[in-house]
Amino acid sequence: MTPSNVLQLELAAAFSSRRALALRVGVALLLGLPFVFAPMPLRARACGLCVLTVFVSFFGAAVGLVRRRAEGQWTRLALLPIPRSIVWSDLLLAGGVVDLVQTAPVVGLLAVVHGLPTAGGALLSAAGALCACVLTLNALGMLLAVAVRTNAEVHLAGALGVGVLVLLSGLVPTAGPLAGVVAAASPFSPVAWLEHALRAMAADASSVGRHSVLAGSLVLLILAAWLAARTVGGPRESEE
Amino acid sequence: MAAIEAHNLTCAHAPGRGVCGVSLAVDAGECYAVLGRNGSGKSTLTRLLLGLEPVGGGSLAVLGLPVARGSRRHLGRLGVCLDTSAHWEALSGWQNACFVAQAYGRNGRALEGRLAWLFDRAGLAPYRDEPVATYSFGMRRKLALVEAFCHEPELAVLDEPTAGVDEQFVVELADLLRQRGARGQTTWIASNDVEWAACVASRVAFLEAGRLVAEGTPEGLIREVSPLCEVHLVLAGSVRVPPPALDGVRAFSQDGTSLRALIGDSRHLPRLLEHVGSTGAEVARVEVARATLRDAFLLKTGRELGP
């Protein structure tokens, strides 16, 4: 395969090595399996998988991009006559797809082990929430990568960022004024949406509202269309 | 129209570093080499051309387009090889080069033919389908140069193009640059490789502490520092040769069978040999030494010539 745009290039690079792919999926499975099989409350399972997703998508995107900037790949891309918006959106989509390949098997296992028999609507809702969560976290990771300069800085800021995201998404109990902040912020957090969707999928599929199913379906449709447009399309658009 | 035009261009990284008031003009079809010691500002000047550094003062135009930090309109007409080679390591050299060529709007059989030809000339053809992760440093540099030339750019911007590559490719690269010049395509080179630059560049500039200290053709710069050739003749036998009264012979000395003379240029050599032959002496060996661009570079950038 000869990649003709940044998305194809990134995906080809990510999936060209079976070993690297197996490591990516294997590590995510190893980290996620305790939250699927170990005896614990459902909320703990859902929160654990959400934290895993934050680590994989937000922290992974930020650290990976800073490493690649140090290797000169940002400059290489910046010197090509490809609009920056296309470069960054392709990087975002590629990061999202790779992260979905890592996280979807764990979420799938949760559905199989705890969610069956579950309604298709709950699955759609969870899948849409996972996609929205992964893409948003990737975008935040990219913003962090742009803001920091060195590898050490991104690890420090990334760890802090994971903590803030986990907190604001309501994954850990809070009290006092902080509880108010979390209550105000969490409805806008895709991580919180994912946590709700996972709980609904594994506990009570009938509790999933129609709007959640619609939103999930919409996210999946947009992602599929975006992906199809960038992978099936012809040669890239030029700035020339 | 000049391919590159800079007027009083400034870009300061830190006091004493960067580019300070550089003015130059590179015509279309020229191969222009900027030479300077490490930290003299060559790479900064090159990055200014690419819009990667902020223009602190003065003006810069590349291919007729004004360039500042973040300028992108000129990039589609450039081929770039920076001093660091960034590739997608898991992909093959061929995949990397195809992606770059397609980014410049090239595709189809013409692209494949062009790339195959470049890979062959670079000696990368046997390794084209291997991951870049398995490439040596020199192979990565060659791949970066292949990518710079894959779309036959109007202006090729090359930073240290000969660093780490083998001699065979250095010769191939020189040939490639001559072909580009013949087609009216411009090449900008920033390098430490003075002798190679003397062979390929139509004009060179010496950069020292961010300032242009000399500019001209390699021949012109050599003449500026030393217009004379030194001729060393070794005689077969010990014969006394009187100093010749010839135009163009500036100095003459004899030490046994060894004669030394300074002449204006090599056109005066036959008359000098004729004079020595007229005394009955037999010349066993002739050596002509000229100053090189390296000598000119060292002198102009503040160092004395060696013995």
Image (cartoon, coloured by chain):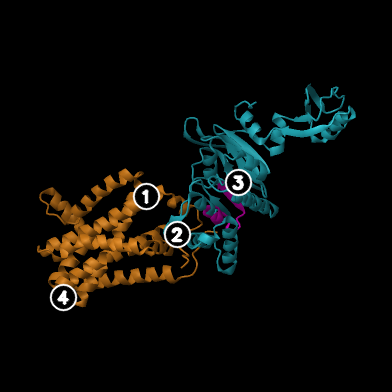
Q: Please give the name of the residue rendered at 21% of the width and 77% of the height, measured from the top-left corner.
A: A120
**Quick check: do tags 2 and 1 share a chain?**
no
The chain painted orange is: A
Chain ID, mark 2 = B
Colour given to chain B in the rendered image: cyan
Chain ID, mark 1 = A
Q: Please tell me whether mark 4 or mark 2 is closer to you in this view.
A: 2
Q: Residue A67 got which mark?
A: 1
> Element type at marker 2?
loop
Q: Please give the name of the residue rendered at 32% of the width and 50% of the height, measured from the top-left corner.
A: A144
Q: Is A47 left or right of B264, judged from the image as shown?
A: left
Query: Outermost residue, front direction?
Result: B237
* Amino acid at dot 4: Leu
**Quick check: do tags 4 and 3 share a chain?**
no
Q: Residue B188 got which mark?
A: 3
N-term-proximal mark, 4 vs 1: 1
* Amino acid at dot 2: Pro
Label 2 sits on residue:
B131
Q: Is B32 left or right of A60, judged from the image as shown?
A: right
Range drawn in magenta:
B143-158
Q: How far is disc 2 from disc 3 in space, using C-alphas?
A: 30 Å
